[in-house]
């Protein structure tokens, strides 16, 4: 019933918007702004949405503010092909149905720098302030040539205001809400000398949590210097520090959920995390039509979890990356990009579960790539190739298995390549249709290789996609259909290793066939947008042949409206629908599917037109009871673990720009 009501509302709003020609007006240029939005992720150099043969979605700082997003997860809700979950103290982003492996199969970047760590920890997004986000570029299925390892579902690149302009972020803000929510911060950016730009941002966020022992405290500080050599050349440095302290309430059984969905099964389990990141970048126009850029990053992170029973986990990470690129423009508007990509990650892991375990794990890769874009009349052709070599150095340091036998890790060397082919046809001043073929790969992270029961291989995938983008009267529309085929997918098999569990390759191919739709209508003061994703998944062979891939909804949709009632007063309403899916790890499909659900959020903002804005909002207005995550830990559909999501939450705040 909920699904029918939501789809009915979706259609009704679309028809209402299209019938409102006489009641509203739209400003010239407003409709085409989505096509003209800047994109950096797809080439590493500035481009726009229309000239990119991918189903790109851009979440602007205005979008983030309108919907009342409090973190990156909120900002990405409703983007076609995206599903956000919150478990184990973090935000996880799933692109195009990656399921339980989304933290390794979706590549997360901040200002073009990879955030996915060398181990299984996943990118940490909780500490990043949305107030300092200029835009978020989402490229489903893209990035295999330019970014290589891990770009399976696609890429999410978060562009900060620190990195986007020479105006920066000059603001102070504060927000309070129920469940002990309190957030405040400030940012200042300006030219402090003739050619020297300086930016400093700080945010502190506290949240008692919806569940017992679900508290989270985060702190974020960023500072940057950028020297503008001339109009085209610059050198920049950025330092960022993120810290998190949080409780881990643990999973619940179904009976425990029915008794009290806010209770915890691990009242004494806590964790803390901190990460320091140093980035150096340089851009130089060597000559007309010849541009050079290089980005280097060094980061170190520490993680500790512990409880009163004496068990603990700790790891120290060090990562370094260097990426030079050269762009040569020829025939006026065609270009070819050459690049080299170096990465090295080291992880020192310590565990104590009655006995001490230490591991030293290292992963190092070298890659070269080239991407050519050739324009001819109304056609644009792209061709890209990447070669990547990955080496592992793993040391167990005297670790023993469950039977007391010494553990020996096997060092390994993997060689892989990626291909990207595309054609884009511009059939009008605003419309284009494209077709692409992508082949990519993901190598095991260090934890997966260390906890494998056999020789773990890399997984490979292929994409075929056809799409269209255009402006139709007062609407921007984009649509795509795609087919994704994966082989040797890496997953955790709870029954492997004599029942102790291990990482292994999924026996057989899996296939996803999908449709992604986005439409946005502009009627002067009213903007309405709709998204719809259909994803049909199937294991094509192997022991699970014919089964659906667990943790992936077949239907996902969103409906949003933003209404500027007066020059000062803005109202926003957003609804998201997520369809039924098998619990994560239930490859047998023997358990019942997890129920579908709808969440509806609203926000109201008043702008005093002197730099001050006040706002308030309610998330999950109708108090929907759903789950951030449901897992099936024995892979047989008989043992479920539930992580209940928050019910209704409300907040008020202010923001002053100066």
Image (tube, rainbow, N blue to C red):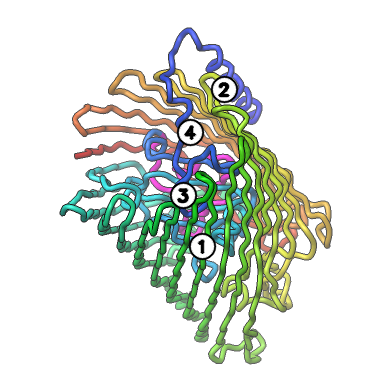
Q: Name the residue beneath numbered marker 3.
A: 40
User: Where 188 sits versus 487, above or below?
Assistant: above
Residue 314, image x, y percentages: 45, 76
Q: Does the CB distance between marks 2 and 1 fall below 8 Å?
A: no
Task: Say whether marks 3 and 1 touch (CB < 8 Å).
Answer: no
Please name the residue that numbered disc 2 is placed on: 472
Q: In whole angstroms, how far apart are the C-alphas of marks 4 and 3?
A: 15 Å
Give the labeled residue for mark 1.
122
Question: Which comes sooner in the sequence, label 3 or label 1?
Answer: 3
Q: Nearer the viewer, residue 534 or 109?
A: 109
Query: Who is closer to the viewer here, 172 or 87?
Result: 172
Label drawn at residue 34:
4
> In the visual, does 142 lie left or right of 167?
right
> Residue 259: horizontal and vertical position, in percent?
55, 49
Q: Residue at x 23, y 53 (%)?
A: 197
Nearer to us in this view, 541 or 33: 33
> Does residue 70 show up magenta in the picture?
yes
Q: CA distance from mark 2 to mark 1?
A: 40 Å
User: Is residue 610 depicted above or below 90 in this figure?
Assistant: above
């Amino acid at each position: 019933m909920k699904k029918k009501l939501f789809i009915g509302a979706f259609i009704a709003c679309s028809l209402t918007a299209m019938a409102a020609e006489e009641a509203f007006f739209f400003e010239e240029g407003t409709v085409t702004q989505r096509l003209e939005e800047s994109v950096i992720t797809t080439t590493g150099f500035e481009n726009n949405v229309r000239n990119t043969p991918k189903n790109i979605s851009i979440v602007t700082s205005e979008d983030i503010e309108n919907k009342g997003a409090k973190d990156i997860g909120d900002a990405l809700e409703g983007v076609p092909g995206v599903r956000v979950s919150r478990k184990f103290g973090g935000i996880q982003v799933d692109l195009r149905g990656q399921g339980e492996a989304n933290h390794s199969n979706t590549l997360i970047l901040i200002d073009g720098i990879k955030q996915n760590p060398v181990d299984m920890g996943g990118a940490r997004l909780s500490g990043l302030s949305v107030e300092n986000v200029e835009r978020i570029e989402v490229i489903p299925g893209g990035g295999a040539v330019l970014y290589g390892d891990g770009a399976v579902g696609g890429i999410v690149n978060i562009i900060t205001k620190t990195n986007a302009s020479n105006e920066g972020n000059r603001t102070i803000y504060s927000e309070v809400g129920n469940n002990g929510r309190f957030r405040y911060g400030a940012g200042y950016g300006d030219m402090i000398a003739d050619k020297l730009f300086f930016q400093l941002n700080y945010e502190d966020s506290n949240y008692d949590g919806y569940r017992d022992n679900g508290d989270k405290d985060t702190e974020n500080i960023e500072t940057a210097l950028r020297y503008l050599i001339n109009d085209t050349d610059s050198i920049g440095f950025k330092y960022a520090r993120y810290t998190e302290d949080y409780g881990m309430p643990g999973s619940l059984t179904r009976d425990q959920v029915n008794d009290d969905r806010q209770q915890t099964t691990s009242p004494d389990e806590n964790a803390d995390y901190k990460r320091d990141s140093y980035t150096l970048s340089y851009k130089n126009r060597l000559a007309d039509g010849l541009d050079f850029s290089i980005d280097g990053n060094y980061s170190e992170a520490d993680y500790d979890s512990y409880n009163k029973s004496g068990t603990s986990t700790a790891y120290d990470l060090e990562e370094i990356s260097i990426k030079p690129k050269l762009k040569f423009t020829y025939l006026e508007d065609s270009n070819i990009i050459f690049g080299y990509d170096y990465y090295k990650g080291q992880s020192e892991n310590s565990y104590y579960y009655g006995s001490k375990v230490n591991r030293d794990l290292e992963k190092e890769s070298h890659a070269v790539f080239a991407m050519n874009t050739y324009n001819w009349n109304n056609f644009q052709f792209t061709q890209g190739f990447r070669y990547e070599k990955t080496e592992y150095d793993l040391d167990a340091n005297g670790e023993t298995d469950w039977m007391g036998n010494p553990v020996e890790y096997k060092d390994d060397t993997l060689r892989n390549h990626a291909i990207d082919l595309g054609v884009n046809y511009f059939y009008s001043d605003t419309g284009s249709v494209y077709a692409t073929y992508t082949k990519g790969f993901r190598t095991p992270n260090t934890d997966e290789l260390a906890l494998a029961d056999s020789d773990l291989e890399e997984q490979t995938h292929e994409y075929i996609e056809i799409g269209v983008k255009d402006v139709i009267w007062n609407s921007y529309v984009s649509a795509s259909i795609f087919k994704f085929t994966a082989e040797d997918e890496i997953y955790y098999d709870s029954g492997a290793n004599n029942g102790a569990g291990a990482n292994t390759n999924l026996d057989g191919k899996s296939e996803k066939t999908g449709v992604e739709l986005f439409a946005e209508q502009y009627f002067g003061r009213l903007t309405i947008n709709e998204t719809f994703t259909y994803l049909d998944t199937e294991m094509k062979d192997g022991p699970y042949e014919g089964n659906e891939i667990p943790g992936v909804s077949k239907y996902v949709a969103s409906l949003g409206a933003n209404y500027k009632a007066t020059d000062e007063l803005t109202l926003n309403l957003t609804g998201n629908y997520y369809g039924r899916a098998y619990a994560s790890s239930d490859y047998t499909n023997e358990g019942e599917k997890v129920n579908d659900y709808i969440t509806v959020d609203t926000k109201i903002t008043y702008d005093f037109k002197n730099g001050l804005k006040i706002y308030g909002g309610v998330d999950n207005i109708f108090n929907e009871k759903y789950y951030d995550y449901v897992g099936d830990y024995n892979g047989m559909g008989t043992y479920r673990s539930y992580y209940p999501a928050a019910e209704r939450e409300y907040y008020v705040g202010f923001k002053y720009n100066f």
